[in-house]
Image (cartoon, grey):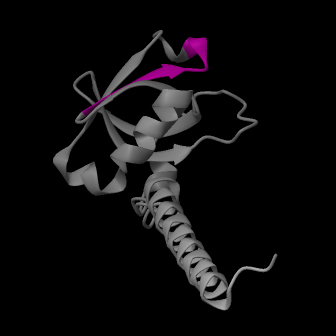
Amino acid sequence: MTPPPEEHQFRSRRQRWAIAIGTLGAVVIGSVLFWLFGPGGSTPEAPVNLSDVPYVDGTLVEVEPPTLVLRPFDESAGAEEMEFTIRPQDEQHFDVAHLRSHSSIGLPTRLYYLEENGRKFAVYKQDAPANSSREDGS
């Protein structure tokens, strides 16, 4: 038995609305997920004299600006963990959300730093090479 034309038309309209609402919902959810987990803004610009600055490769174990704590790959770095301070003039070189993502999953990180009066000041961060030789660059 074929449904009357009015009921068929009602079902089609209802199905079209369900498809439209489902599509809209999928687009909204996809957009939110991309916004949350998609690529961030631009990468912070490196300081001009970066090639003259010592660095160390390791994994970040604490990211609480202005403090960063790094566990170096190279045990000869002299410490099991190294503490760095981000100075106000260097803050623009660090993306804190990116640093925290490195810390949360143990991604290799290269910190460039300056040392003054026994304190280490982080001036820039790079993703350490995946096949890092795990050597201190100072």
Side of 69 relative to 106 (left or right): left
Seen from this angle, which residue lies furthest right?
1
From the viewer's side, name the closer residue of 36 and 46: 36
Please state, as top left, top right, bottom left or bottom right, where the N terminus lies in the image.
bottom right
Q: Is residue 60 visible?
A: yes
Q: Nearer the viewer, residue 58 or 104?
A: 104
Q: How far across and how far down the image is residue 130, in percent?
A: 71, 38
Image vertical order of residue 60 relative to residue 26, above or below: above
Q: Please name the residue shown 56% across and 71% down the image.
A: 18
Magenta span has 71?
yes
Q: Is residue 92 above or below residue 66?
A: below
Judged left or right of residue 115, residue 133 is: right
Picture coordinates of residue 76, whole percent (x, y):
57, 13
Residue at the image point whose x is 64% and y is 27% from the top: 135
Q: Residue furthest left?
A: 88
Q: Is 101 in the magenta?
A: no
Is there any visible trace of residue 124 in the rendered image?
no
Q: Determine whether 55 is above or below 50 in the image.
A: above
Q: What's the residue at 40%, 60% (across, down)?
A: 44
- Lateral position of residue 32 relative to residue 136, left or right: left
* Residue range of the region highlighted in magenta in the rendering: 67-76
Give the percent coordinates (x, y) of residue 45: 41, 63
Q: Main secondary structure of the magenta part?
A: strand
Q: How many marks?
A: 0
Horizontal side of residue 17 vs 44, given as left or right: right
